[in-house]
Structure formats: C-alpha cells, structure tokens
Image (spheres, grey):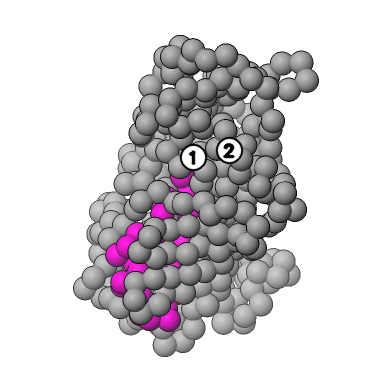
Amino acid sequence: MTMPANLESDAVRLREAMAKALADDGVLPDPAWRAAVEAVPRHRFVPGFYLPADARDEQGLTVWEPTTAELGYGRWLAAAYSDTTLITQFDGDEPDWKQPAVRHGGAPTSSSTLPSLVVRMWADAEVAEGHTVLEIGTGTGYSTALVCERLGSAGVTSIEVDPHRLEQAASALYGCGYTPTLAVADGLYGYWPEARFDRIVAACSFRAIPPALLVQARPGGKILLTLSGWLYGYARVLLTVDGDGTAEGQLLGGTVSFMSARTHAAPAYGNPAHWAAGLTEKPRAARHSPERFTAATEEAFHLRFLAQSAVPDAQMTTVGEVVHLVDVVTGSAATLTPGDGGWAVRQGGQVRLWDRIEHTLDAYDAAGAPGPETFTLRVHEGGQHIRHPQMPDLPLPRP
C-alpha cells in the first residue's frame, strides 16, 4: 500500500492532540518533554501491532486483531497516537506484518508502552541535560527516541535482548535522525562498554536488582526499574547508588506493570491437581481471603507485591473456585477453597506459603495499611530487603 499523501500532516495533528491531552492530564509538566512528544513520530516505530477485539472467543481468550496501515489506515494512525500500550509481539514470535493473522490469547513479549508512562518513567528517573543514560528494553524504539529528542543521542545507550526487535527499532530510530548507541544484550548484565551511567531505566521488570546495574551506575547515579515476581506483583523503585555497591531508594506509587526480563520469567509448574494431591494435612480456616490481593484495586495491587515478597518462589493459579499456590523451588504448596463464611486452607512442604502471606497481611494491617511510598528498598552485601519501620523486612530473591 502506498501511504496517503497527507500521512505526515495527519500525524502532526494527532501528535499535537495527544501531547495536549497528556499535558491537560498533568503528565507533561515539563515543556521539554511535551516538545519531545510533539516531535517524535510514533507511527514510524509501530508499523504493525495488535489491538484487542471487543469480545473474547468461545474459550474465553482475548482475540488480538492485527493493525497496520494496509488493514485500516485510520484505525492504525489513531491508535498510534493514543495513550495506549501497543502489543507488537507474542510468545517471542515475530509476526509477518505483510500477512498478519488474528491471534487468540498468548503472552505479550514486546510492545510500545503507552506514551504517558514512558514520559513518566524518564521524569521519575530525574533525567536531565548532560546525563548519560542506559535504557534496558529498546522495544520499538519509541521511548529511546523520546529521550534522544530530550537529551540528544550522544549520551543515550539502549539495549534489547531480541535481535530482530532491535533491528527494527534501529531502522526507525536512524530513519528519524536519532543515533543512540544500540546493542543486543541482556538487561540483567547491563552494558559495560558504555558504563558508567548517570541514569539506568528499565522498560522490563526484574525479580531483584541485578548486581551489574549497581556497579555500572556512577556514585550518586539513579536506577529506576520495576520489581516483579511469579505472583505477578509489581512495584517501581528509584534507587540512589552509593560508591561502594550499595543502594537505597523509595518505592513509587501507582499501578505500573512491565513484562518480565526473559531470564526472570516464571517457570512451568505442571498440573495444579498433582500438587493438591500431595497435601495431606487437615484444612484450617484462613484468616485472610486471597481476594485481598487479587481484587482490581490499587491497594490489592500493592498487597500482591508484598505477598509475593513473602513467598518469592511461589506461583498462583485458580482452577474452578480453588486457589492453588505452588513453589517449584522447595516443593511446597497450598490450596484455598471458598466455603460458608470464609476460606479453608491446606498446606504442605517445608514452606508454609499461606502462613507467610497471612503474617505479612497481619503486619500490614497492624501498621495501618501503609502505602508503597512508605516502603524503601535497601541493597547491601547481606541481600536486598523491602523495609518499613513498622513491619518485618521482606527479602527479595537472590539475583
């Protein structure tokens, strides 16, 4: 398809409208970031992506519809300039955008993050002129283009674990006149050839702070990343790095989630029924409902991260009405079954998974339901610990 002659003028109009909407929502208080959003042509970085259909399929799976200019110019361009995350890849499989197919379900593995969050990340990291920056997770390259527009390309390094993704991002970046340092690399190890950095910002999530990032940041430098885990709890943290390999910082508010770094993704755990069959102890009444951290609320989002920190090797799934917790590291498991007036829990293995979660929820309630901004992360020789003055420390898994 030959692009319409009015593509660039349409894009400029939509870009300005998106920037105005973000500014009206308070996302762009810094005029320099608004200018960057107005300047970077996002449509150049997302020639193809998936949008969810209005209804699920007969199996309850999300139906993902491919969206390109060829399939629908207006829908494609409007979505490119909406404040929406655009999924560009599932399960690590690169789509054939010349003949794209509808997808049913699947795990997103690459995307163009919604512009408001991209700008918020760069602003939260306190990026300023003269800083050298490492971005982990180039993705489509749109976020990279924004920081290049803001700071200039010379101090920007961006790494991506997927070589095909990086190739496409590089083509778009260079085509738009941006020339950051780009490399295929695993974000778990940062990028030594360009270290040290004033700021390190990750567009993926980690179970714990990778040690390589701590020593690749300058003393006094900052690292902004999202912590995640196998319960799919998330928390963002902004760390200030000391000169001796330690770091400390505050958890940030909000309900932000990112795809896991591929080396930190949850392992397969098998059939939940097999785990449940090994639980021989008698059930007891649960003091807390799993709904406390599975509900669609901001508090539940925060509690899910705290619960995950209490049982960092556990995974959770629901079969029918029964909630299963399984720990592939220790072989421990628990089930929660709803009944009249509450939940019954059975546990087995060396780690009493639900006991640990309940103790954390008890401490949270006793502390007066503190928000994420009242917690800090301390990284030191003894490990990595989430801390609150009125709660026991919660260790993160060894990186």
Q: Could you classify mark 2 by the number of other residues whose Cα lies within 10 Å: few (under 14), some (14-19), or many (20 or more)?
A: many
Amino acid carrying label 2: it is: Ile
Instruction: Give the farthest residue toward the right.
Output: 341
Q: Are marks 1 and 2 in contact (CB under 8 Å)?
A: yes
Q: Nearer the viewer, residue 350 or 256?
A: 350
Q: Nearer the viewer, residue 257 or 388?
A: 388
Q: Which residue is mark 1?
A: 311
Residue at 42%, 38% (x, y): give it. 313
CA–CA distance between discs 1 and 2? 7 Å
Residues drawn in magenta? 206-229
State yes or no: residue 222 in magenta: yes
Q: Which residue is mark 2?
A: 357
Amino acid carrying label 1: it is: Val
Q: Determine the image quadrant of residue 172.
A: bottom left
Q: Position of residue 227 (x, y in %)?
A: 48, 54
Q: Determine the image quadrant of residue 212.
A: bottom left
Q: Is residue 348 above or below residue 16?
A: above
* Residue 30 appears in the figure: yes
* Residue 51 appears in the figure: no
Mark 1 element type:
loop
Q: Position of residue 378 (x, y in %)?
A: 47, 64
Q: Is residue 260 above or below residue 119?
A: above
Q: Earlier in the sequence, mark 1 or mark 2?
A: 1
Residue at 55%, 64% (x, y): give it. 376
Q: Position of residue 90 (x, y in %)?
A: 40, 39
Checking the image for residue 71, the label placed there is none
Residue at 78%, 20% (x, y): give it. 341
Residue at 68%, 32% (x, y): give it. 288
